[in-house]
Amino acid sequence: MANFLVDPHRFVPAGFHVLEPWGADERLARMYVTAATAPPKRHESWAIAQVVPRPEDAEIDQVLNQVHDHIEQHLHWDVVSFAESAVGLGLFRMADSAIRDLLVAQPPHDLGHGRMLSFVRHDEGENFRATVYTRLSWIMMLNLPFDYHTEEFIHDSVAKFGKMRGWIRDDQEPARTLVRCAYGGARDIPRSIVIREPQRYGGTVVSWTVPLYILSSEAADNLPGDESPETDNGNPHPQFFVGPIPPHDSWVPPQHDNWENWNNEIADDNNMAHGGWDEPQQQQAPVQQ
């Protein structure tokens, strides 16, 4: 998780307000959600402009336009669009991903007034962090309603605390659901999950409580060893026997204890291939006088 300053009021739609209703002080500080797969990259022309120190709220629009002019007039790249960002100063869309990467590779620029400008990719801003799954376990769910025995729902349930690695689809025990998952620590796994299903009208919902149990635990980072160093002779797969590799045309058939009988056995096998009869001899055409 990343801790950083943010001003949500600049992004609230007209007519709405940021509320802190009763009980808001007990809201969870964070909740993890793990994607089933990484989404395809469809926004590789976007970059985040970072200005240090960050301008005051009254100056943000002015500095955004200053950054836009700097890109187009000094760096000579066209800006397709730009907008304020909650992380960094602004989001800038370039003509393509190649120009975006050139923009990101630029050294910091002096904007004047003691401000320095730099760029990062749109998904590598201040909220971008590394996290680690340290454990790999089998989890048992009990009495999960049959209609929720789907890979999509089980993944969504596990995504709140870890990454689903697999599950037993056709368990002989219908009351249990076995799921293999990676997670950060035992404290991340709740003792039960509550499934809420909304009804057609109003705010009434029905729910099912499903107990969770940890059945195994192992380190998630059981990585293989490092690559082997290059050998002195350049051959990564040496022979088991000592001596040079014989040339291709020097192969001789293995010596049989009774070479003559071995050849006779081969001849018998060839005869069996013709139904036990000797191979028919091709007759020569009669010579005409």
Image (cartoon, helix red, strand yellow):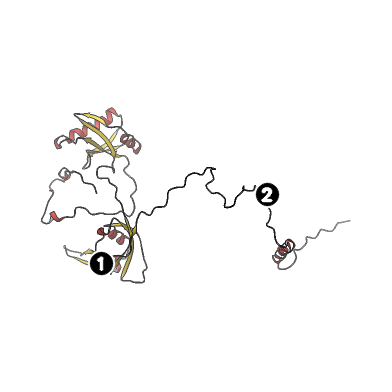
Q: In what quadrant of the picture does the C terminus appear?
A: bottom right
Residue annotated with mark 1: 210
Q: Which residue is mark 2?
A: 250
Where does the image place residue 31, in percent across and percent down from the top left?
23, 54
As displayed, is residue 196 above or below residue 229? below
The quadrant holding residue 276 is bottom right
Q: Is residue 29 above or below residue 111?
A: below
Q: Residues within 10 Å of mark 1 (few under 14, many from 20)?
A: some
SS class, disc 2: helix
How many callouts does the rendering have? 2
Q: Amino acid at mark 2?
A: Ser
Residue found at the very far left of the displayed protein:
22
- Within 10 Å of the Cα at label 2, are there few (<14), some (14-19), or many (20+) other Cα atoms? few
Give the left or right position of residue 107, taking residue 10 as reference. right
Quarter of the view holding residue 28: bottom left
17 or 249: nearer the eye? 249
Q: Position of residue 173 (x, y in %)?
A: 34, 72
Q: CB atoms at circles 2 and 1 under 8 Å apart?
A: no
Residue farthest to the front? 242
